[in-house]
């Protein structure tokens, strides 16, 4: 590095070279800083940007390398701006915020409708020790397999449409939650924990697609998220846990109806980004555990199963009076 920079001394062009790189760095910083202003009117470009927003940080070292190659002081100084913005947005996720304790462990997993071995997947997630386990994308033909595999671990369970909740504690007031799909992919239950009642929501938002001719197609997902947000807003219990595959990240503005009311356990008490999809090379956390009225203590991803999603888990404290 010293040898490389030695060739810059006395070279007045170091300030004139790399103007294009500097402009690119400024544009990158602007996109990250103003991501909420990227319009959704064309192909839901804003939501697509927000889904993969952390990955824009990979462009920073690329610009840095090109700035060094071009021997451009202007470019190198400009690269500092997107680096600062990225650290401001995501630097907190780089630290380990996990803590010990917690009186309830919860987990959620999109098991994949085409799962080749649902029994093994059920045993894998049950071995995590979760007190509450939510499963999404349950085909009717596989529900008996999951029920049998989980029966020895969970005394109570309920399945509504393609989602289900398994619990070590009694459940009541189980009902479907209408997320405007025409079929059932969300549910609510009251779980009688040792620390009192807990409202538990399980949801699987409609899938989104990236299409050349249509962009990021997420209109139905967005409509369902609004409906789920209304249901949570009407919840009468003070302590709420939402488990599920939301097909969107906490950065995605289209999930504001939900994310504005609840805290992400990963953001509050996790270590790292906690990416959950795709399981083969996780690039986004679209499987979420969110809470209200309870305190997250730790949050993490579980080992891969036969699904294309990773399971995610969290420990929370229900008694927040102290």
Image: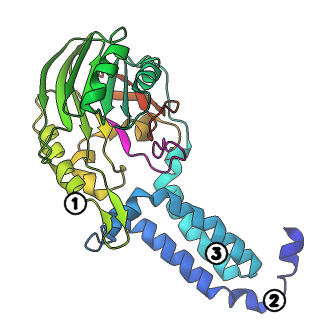
Q: Give how far across and how far down residue 282 sits, in percent.
A: 51, 46
Image quadrant occupied by the N terminus: bottom right
Q: Is residue 257 shown to the viewer in this render?
A: yes
Compute the Cα span from label 1 to label 3: 40 Å
Nearer to us: label 1 or label 3: 1
Whichever of callouts 1 and 3 sits on the residue coming sooner in the sequence is 3
Q: Are marks 2 and 1 in contact (CB under 8 Å)?
A: no
Which quadrant, please, contains the C terminus? top left
Q: Which mark is residue 77?
A: 3
The residue located at (24%, 34%) in the rendering is 162
Q: Is residue 213 above or below residue 292?
A: below
Q: Which is more N-terminal, label 1 or label 2?
A: 2
How far separated are the C-alphas under marks 2 and 1? 54 Å
Residue 282 higher or lower than 135, as above or below: below
Number of numbered discs present?
Answer: 3
Please give the residue where the numbered disc 2 appears in the rendered image: 11
Image side of residue 128 versus residue 76, left or right: left
Q: Nearer the viewer, residue 166 or 298?
A: 166
Q: What residue do we see at 30% from left, 45% from top?
A: 246
Q: Which mark is residue 219?
A: 1
Magenta extent:
273-294
Residue 46 disc label: none
Give the secondary structure at mark 3: helix
Residue 157 in the image, given as x and y percentages of width and height: 24, 17
Query: Magenta span has 280?
Result: yes
Dot 2, crowdedness within 10 Å: few (<14), some or many (≥20)? Answer: few
Residue 77 is situated, as x and y percent measured from the top left of the image, at: 64, 75
Farthest right residue in view: 3
Q: Answer yes or no: do the residues labelled 2 and 3 have beta carbons within 8 Å? A: no
């Amino acid at each position: 590095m010293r040898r490389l920079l030695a060739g810059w001394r006395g070279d007045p062009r170091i300030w004139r070279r790399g103007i294009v790189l500097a402009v690119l760095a400024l544009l990158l910083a602007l996109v990250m800083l103003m991501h909420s202003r990227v319009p959704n009117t064309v192909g839901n470009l804003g939501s697509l940007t927000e889904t993969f927003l952390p990955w824009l940080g990979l462009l920073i070292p690329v610009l840095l390398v090109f700035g060094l190659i071009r021997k451009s002081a202007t470019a190198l100084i400009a690269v500092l701006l997107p680096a600062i913005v990225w650290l401001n947005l995501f630097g907190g996720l780089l630290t380990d915020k996990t803590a010990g304790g917690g009186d309830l462990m919860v987990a959620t997993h999109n098991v994949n409708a085409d799962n080749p071995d649902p029994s093994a997947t059920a045993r894998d997630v049950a071995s995590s020790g979760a007190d509450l386990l939510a499963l999404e994308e349950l085909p009717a033909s596989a529900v008996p397999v999951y029920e049998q595999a989980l029966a020895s671990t969970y005394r109570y369970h309920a399945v509504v449409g393609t989602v289900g909740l398994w619990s070590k504690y009694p459940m009541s007031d189980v009902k479907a939650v209408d997320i405007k799909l025409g079929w059932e992919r969300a549910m609510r239950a009251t779980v009688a924990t040792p620390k009192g009642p807990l409202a538990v929501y399980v949801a699987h938002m409609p899938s989104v697609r990236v299409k050349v001719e249509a962009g990021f197609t997420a209109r139905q997902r967005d409509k369902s998220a609004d409906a789920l947000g209304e249901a949570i807003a009407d919840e009468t219990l003070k302590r709420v846990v939402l488990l599920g595959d939301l097909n969107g990240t906490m950065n995605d503005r289209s999930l504001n109806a939900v994310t504005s009311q609840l805290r992400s356990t990963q953001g509050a008490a996790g270590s790292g980004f906690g990416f959950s999809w795709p399981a083969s090379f996780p690039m986004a956390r679209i499987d979420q555990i969110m809470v209200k009225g309870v305190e997250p203590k730790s949050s993490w991803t579980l080992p891969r199963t036969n699904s294309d999603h990773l399971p995610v888990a969290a420990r929370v404290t229900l008694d927040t009076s102290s």
